[in-house]
Image (spheres, rainbow, N blue to C red):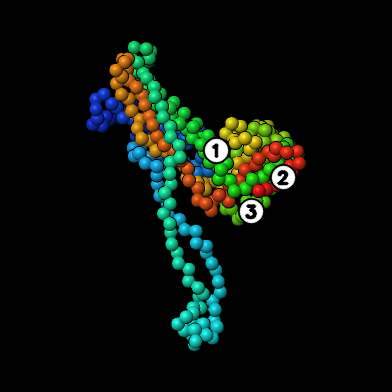
């Protein structure tokens, strides 16, 4: 974890009653995200883009995208293709497709804020260090809020849903076999990742598939399941998952995460001997439509007739 000493930063020209710490907070968010973000491998580079001093705008950035399919034809050597009667009206390369890119504005979808007070007479610690400590804790709180937002984004992005009645040590292999088959059939390339609830994690560990001959690397001694059916497995808390959802599986690096810092500052207070510590920012995520096929989830069915199936 990165800690900061506020006295090390050169003060920029500003109102003497207001001190701005947006750059310092940006560094803290980047450092904390790299350690505490539960779904960072879903995003490009396993990181988040942190923008300092963003304006009051609904748009985070713009991307250029094209949904024109690639078509492979044959080279036509017909006598009247590009020659003879077809000289001016045909091409041996086939029909020409025009390539056009569209600009897509990517919006911020959520906001965060904090507001605290540090009183010189009651803080009972070094005043400057207290502010630094609180900024670090706020960076951790922002990251935890992003964890929840990212989990929700993954759930909503999933193009594949597998429904099962339950996940046990006897059914977990078939479940991940279904997921593996899906990713193979959609020709998804890259490292396969699965974030699972504690119950699913324990089912993997207890499945008895810990032998290399069965393609699993479950370490029973350490109670850790690192890989299973070609997926890198990570256990995360249940409250990150939507209701009845127990697995989020995806190819790593298929999306982009970002947050913008409007301000992080201290202002001398009028009603106590100290400062108000304030911060405000926005956040969001983006995944190209075509990449959604590389995202899947497992949901517990609510009816007794459910069997492993897909939607």
Callout 3 secondary element? helix
The numbered mark, 1 or 2, whose residue comes first in the sequence reads 1
Depth-wise, is mark 2 or mark 3 nearer the camera?
2
Callout 1 secondary element? helix
Numbered label attached to residue 260: none
Residue 154 vertical position relative to residue 80 in the rendered view, above or below: above
Image side of residue 86 versus residue 212, left or right: left
Numbered label attached to residue 308: 2
Nearest to the observer: residue 150 or residue 225 = 150
Separation (CA) of disc 1 from disc 2: 23 Å
Numbered label attached to residue 184: 3
Q: Mark 2–mark 3 contact, CB under 8 Å?
A: no
Residue 62 vertical position relative to residue 267 in the rendered view, above or below: below
Numbered label attached to residue 151: 1
The numbered mark, 1 or 3, whose residue comes first in the sequence reads 1
Q: Position of residue 147 (x, y in %)?
A: 51, 35
Q: Residue placed at 49% from the left, 35% from the top? A: 146
Q: From where the camera sits, is residue 204 visible?
A: no
**How many numbered discs sit on the rendered protein?**
3
Residue 294 vertical position relative to residue 20 in the rendered view, above or below: below
């Amino acid at each position: 974890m990165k800690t900061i000493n506020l006295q090390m930063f050169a003060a920029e020209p500003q109102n003497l009653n207001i001190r701005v710490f947006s750059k310092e907070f940006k560094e803290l968010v980047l450092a904390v995200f790299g350690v505490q973000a539960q779904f960072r491998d879903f995003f490009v580079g396993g990181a988040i883009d942190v923008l300092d001093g963003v304006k009051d705008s609904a748009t985070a950035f713009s991307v250029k995208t094209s949904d024109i399919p690639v078509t492979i034809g044959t080279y036509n050597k017909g006598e009247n293709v590009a020659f003879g009667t077809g000289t001016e009206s045909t091409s041996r390369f086939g029909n020409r497709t025009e390539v056009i890119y569209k600009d897509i504005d990517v919006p911020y979808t959520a906001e965060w804020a904090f507001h605290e007070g540090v009183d010189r007479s009651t803080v009972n610690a070094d005043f400057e260090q207290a502010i630094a400590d609180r900024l670090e804790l706020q960076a951790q709180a922002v990251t935890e809020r992003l964890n929840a937002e990212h989990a929700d984004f993954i759930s909503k992005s999933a193009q594949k849903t597998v429904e099962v009645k339950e996940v046990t040590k006897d059914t977990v292999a078939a479940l991940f076999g279904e997921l593996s088959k899906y990713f193979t059939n959609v020709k998804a390339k890259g490292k396969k990742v699965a974030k699972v609830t504690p119950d699913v994690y324990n089912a993997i560990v207890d499945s008895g598939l810990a032998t290399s001959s069965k393609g699993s690397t479950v370490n029973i001694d350490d109670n850790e399941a690192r890989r299973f059916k070609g997926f890198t497995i990570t256990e995360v808390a249940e409250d990150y998952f939507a209701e009845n959802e127990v697995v989020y599986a995806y190819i790593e690096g298929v999306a982009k995460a970002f947050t913008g810092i409007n301000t992080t500052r201290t202002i001398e207070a009028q009603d106590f001997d100290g400062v108000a510590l304030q911060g405000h920012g926005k956040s969001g995520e983006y995944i190209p439509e075509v990449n959604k096929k590389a995202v899947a989830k497992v949901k517990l069915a609510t009816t007794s007739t459910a069997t492993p199936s897909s939607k």
